[in-house]
Image (cartoon, rainbow, N blue to C red):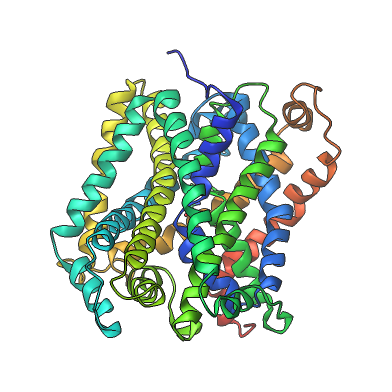
């Protein structure tokens, strides 16, 4: 079967950046930064990206491009029949798993875009925003409608193929996302009192930094860069042999970090403008769908055109960010099903979409009719979220770094990142050192930290 490549280097970078820039940039990074020492957290986060993120991203790129295969196939080819082949399968499974709950939130962002545009939030008392969200999320039908629409859009893009689907949509959506980010940032930092918000976000406070904060920064860097599973490996299997892997990884990381910091510039000036305590805005869904609609409404004038526009653009931005990430997750599974079971792209994508529809439905209903159904003491949504974030991603990341540092042939590694000797790679030894020692140990600590092992033995 003829395998497609991305048509251009820009397309390749934008697609990978589209995977990285997602909900994590907006609903987790800014609040983690504000609460954990501002610029101090940002510096630690950037160190995590340089020391751990870049080496693993380059390895994932390399594994994908060298094998020109889906993630499971890639590890199978490189593992010579050893059990390392399971790392690829784990990656595919992780992506599939994340997509189930991620799409539910993608659907919510669409609903909130429409609610904002329809001026539904005007005149609503602050304490009622929670009821609006709970009423929506617990309704058996409405969230499903948006979930199915979201999945339908992903399916449409995926079936169009690598160039006309993934690359074309990334070339359209990433610049759109960038422009909206800049517009919202400018509006937000011009609000009276914005400087207090920026101070909260940026003032370095090293006293807040402890081992827990460092672990948090590592975990966030990991999720945000889409590492530890098959996404970047799958996308890199569509890179051509001339794509510079190191430079592409640096560009993707820069774009991802820029958008994450800008998300803080969008959120906190408004929070301070209305005199709200930033430690009470929440994180994740409660920040995004309960605190922020209220914050934007009041910061820009309840019911005013500016408030409507700002809020609508913000949720549209979230929708675009979630969509490009979800497309990359779907592609991991689609490439796997299509290539490993020798199916057409249409059939492969349909199988993946069907499973997401079923499992996504369970996740969505876990806020309503299925809220009492618990797996490992959690509802479906939390189980999918926690299991992938706390177990599958760190495990995948650790195995990928060990595999690329210890198992993969060094000459092959060097040859690939230098594009057959065409590019200089003065960082090669450092890269291997990180993959062999620093990354596995650091990620291992994140893993134990997330499982609560340190608390259990009284170290935190
Ligand atoms: N990086 C995305 C975010 O920050 O929201 C989430 C994500 C996408 C994680 C794709 C993992 C992945 F493979």
Q: In this view of the protein, which residue sits in the foreground, 119 or 130? A: 119
Q: Which residue is at a point 44% across and 46% down the rendered structure image? A: 325
Say left or right for 257 vs 187.
right
User: Can you name the residue that lies furthest to the front here?
Assistant: 305
Q: Reply above or below: 252 against 275.
A: above
Can residue 202 be spotted in the picture?
yes
Can residue 390 be spotted in the picture?
no
Say left or right for 397 vs 422.
left
**Image location of residue 86, percent across then percent down:** 51, 40
Q: In this view of the protein, which residue sits in the foreground, 132 or 373? A: 132
Q: Which residue is at a point 73% across and 42% down the rendered structure image? A: 406
Q: How many marks?
A: 0
Q: Which residue is at a point 42% across and 30% down the rendered structure image? A: 335
Quarter placement of the N terminus = top left
Q: Reply above or below: 72 against 4.
A: below
Q: Please tell me in which quadrant of the rendered image residue 422 appears.
A: top right
**Image location of residue 180, percent across then percent down:** 46, 52
Q: Reply above or below: 280 against 59.
A: below
**Image location of residue 110, percent across then percent down:** 29, 54
Quarter placement of the C terminus = bottom right
Q: In this view of the protein, which residue sits in the foreground, 445 or 175? A: 175
User: Can you name the residue that lies furthest to the top here?
Assistant: 2
Q: Which residue is at a point 13% across and 62% down the rendered structure image? A: 140
Say left or right for 102 vs 449.
left
Q: Reply above or below: 130 against 136.
A: below
**Image location of residue 233, percent across then percent down:** 55, 36
């Amino acid at each position: 079967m003829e395998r497609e490549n991305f048509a251009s280097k820009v397309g390749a970078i934008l697609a990978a950046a589209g995977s990285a820039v997602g909900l994590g940039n907006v609903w987790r990074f800014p609040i983690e930064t504000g609460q954990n020492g501002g610029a101090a957290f940002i510096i630690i986060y950037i160190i995590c990206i340089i020391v751990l993120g870049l080496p693993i991203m380059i390895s994932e790129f390399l594994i994908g491009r060298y094998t020109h295969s889906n993630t499971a196939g890639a590890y199978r080819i490189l593992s010579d029949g050893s059990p390392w082949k399971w790392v690829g399968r784990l990656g595919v499974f992780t992506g599939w798993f994340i997509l189930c709950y991620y799409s539910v939130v993608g659907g919510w962002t669409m609903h909130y875009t429409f609610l904002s545009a329809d001026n539904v939030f005007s005149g609503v008392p602050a304490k009622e925003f929670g009821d609006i969200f709970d009423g929506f999320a617990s309704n058996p039908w409405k969230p499903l409608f948006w979930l199915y629409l979201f999945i339908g859009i992903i399916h449409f893009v995926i079936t169009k193929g690598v160039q006309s689907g993934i690359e074309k949509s990334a070339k359209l959506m990433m610049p759109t996302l960038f422009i909206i980010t800049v517009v919202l940032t400018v509006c937000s930092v011009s609000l009276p009192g914005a400087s207090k918000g920026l101070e909260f976000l940026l003032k370095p406070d090293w006293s807040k930094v402890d081992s827990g904060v460092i672990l948090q920064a590592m975990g966030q860097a990991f999720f945000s860069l889409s590492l530890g599973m098959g996404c970047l490996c799958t996308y890199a299997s569509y890179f051509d042999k001339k794509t510079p892997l190191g430079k592409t990884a640096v560009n993707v990381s820069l774009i991802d970090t820029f958008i994450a910091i800008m998300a803080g510039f969008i959120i906190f000036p408004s929070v301070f403008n209305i005199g709200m305590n930033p430690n009470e805005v929440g994180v994740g869904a409660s920040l995004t769908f309960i605190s922020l609609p209220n914050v934007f409404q009041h910061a820009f004038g309840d019911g005013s055109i500016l408030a409507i526009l700002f809020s609508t653009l913000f949720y549209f931005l979230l929708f675009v960010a979630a969509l490009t990430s979800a497309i990359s997750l779907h592609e991991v599974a689609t490439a796997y099903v299509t290539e490993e079971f020798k199916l057409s792209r249409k059939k492969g994508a349909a199988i993946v979409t069907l499973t997401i529809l079923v499992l996504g439905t369970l996740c969505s209903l876990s806020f309503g009719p299925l809220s009492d159904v618990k797996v490992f003491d959690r509802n479906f949504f939390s189980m999918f979220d926690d299991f992938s974030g706390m177990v599958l991603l760190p495990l995948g990341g650790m195995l990928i770094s060990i595999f690329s540092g210890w198992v993969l042939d060094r000459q092959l590694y060097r040859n690939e990142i230098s594009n057959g000797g065409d590019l200089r790679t003065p960082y090669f030894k450092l890269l291997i050192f990180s993959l062999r020692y620093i990354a596995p140990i650091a990620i291992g600590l994140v893993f134990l930290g997330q499982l609560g092992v340190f608390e259990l033995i009284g170290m935190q």
